[in-house]
């Protein structure tokens, strides 16, 4: 069986990375965490990776003349570590069409909203401003269009009337920590595939993502 060697790409605190590390430690991750790569040398997630004994790399996007040049360096580093799957976990750089083409079907992102609602930034504030009753997070395949690839798994929670954006962000992140490793397990074990631009789980096309309810 393949080792499902997986890289986690981060830019910040890395709480999602920590969730993957914890699942691996509990022996409930079907993938091997083989590299943690950050575009920022001060990302706290690098400390988490170091504490877990994982290989790390820093590639600073400011050192590259173009988005694609930066992405080609990332790909070279992934190749050097024999990476099969790539997990974006708070990686705050938009990837070039070239990179997406190299990894399509093997590249997942988590986005803090119930896509297709609220692509882009500042999702929690926008949910509160709209008075939505539900919010959550989405794991999706990455395609060339930002936050628009086929959704795989959503965690959904009701928006309490008195909640503020910071608390909502905290709750959504807790959900991400539950759903993202599960989605990677599906992908790494071959249950989840990307076929003709669609997500396929257990040989069934997902016309909409699997939804899990949280409180
Ligand atoms: C996560 O909440 C993730 O949904 C979000 O960044 C956070 C990273 O947190 N991603 C995006 O907004 C991508 N558009 P973490 O560094 O603690 O895992």
Image (spheres, rainbow, N blue to C red):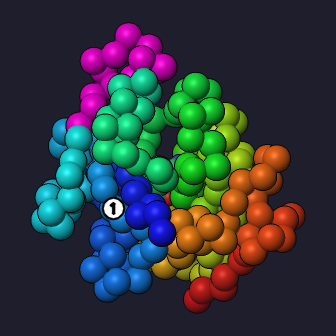
Residue 1 versus residue 124 in the image, above or below: below
Instruction: Give the quadrant of ligand 1.
Output: bottom left
* Image-based side of 38 in relation to 180, left or right: left
Q: Residue 158 location in percent, x, y?
A: 65, 81
Locate residue 96: give its quadrant.
top right
Indicate yes or no whether the magenta region holds residue 82: no
User: Which residue lies under the disc numbered 1?
Assistant: 33
* Outermost front residue: 1
The answer to whether residue 116 of the structure is visible from this angle is no
Task: Determine the residue positioned at 72% across, 54% down.
Answer: 194
Provide the residue span drawn in magenta.
58-70
Q: Is mark 1 within 8 Å of ligand 1?
A: no
Q: Residue at x 54, y 58 (%)?
A: 110
Q: Quadrant of the C terminus?
A: bottom right
Magenta region includes residue 63: yes
Q: Secondary structure at mark 1?
A: strand
Q: Residue at x 57, y 50 (%)?
A: 106
Locate residue 34: give its quadrant: bottom left
How many numbered marks are there? 1
CA neighbours of label 1 inside 10 A, class few (<14), some (14 to 19), many (20+): many
| Residue 44 x %, y % | 21, 54
């Amino acid at each position: 069986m393949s080792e499902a060697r997986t890289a986690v790409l981060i830019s910040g605190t890395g709480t999602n990375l920590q969730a993957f590390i914890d699942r691996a430690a509990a022996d409930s991750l079907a993938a091997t965490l083989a590299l943690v790569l950050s575009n920022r040398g001060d990302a706290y997630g690098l400390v988490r990776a170091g504490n877990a004994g994982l290989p790390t790399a820093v590639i600073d996007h400011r050192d590259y003349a173009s988005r694609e040049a930066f992405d080609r360096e990332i790909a070279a580093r992934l190749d050097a570590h024999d990476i099969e799957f790539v997990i974006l976990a708070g990686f705050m750089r938009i990837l070039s069409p070239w990179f997406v083409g190299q990894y399509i079907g093997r590249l997942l992102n988590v986005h803090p909203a119930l896509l297709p609602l609220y692509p882009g930034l500042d999702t929690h504030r926008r949910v509160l401003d709209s008075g939505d009753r539900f919010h959550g997070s989405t794991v999706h395949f990455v395609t060339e269009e930002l936050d628009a690839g086929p959704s795989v798994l959503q965690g959904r929670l009701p928006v309490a009337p008195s909640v503020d954006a910071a608390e909502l962000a905290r709750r959504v992140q807790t959900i991400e920590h539950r759903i993202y490793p599960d989605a990677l397990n599906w992908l790494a074990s071959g249950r989840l595939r990307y076929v003709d631009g669609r997500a396929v789980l257990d040989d069934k096309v997902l016309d909409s993502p699997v939804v899990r309810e949280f409180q």
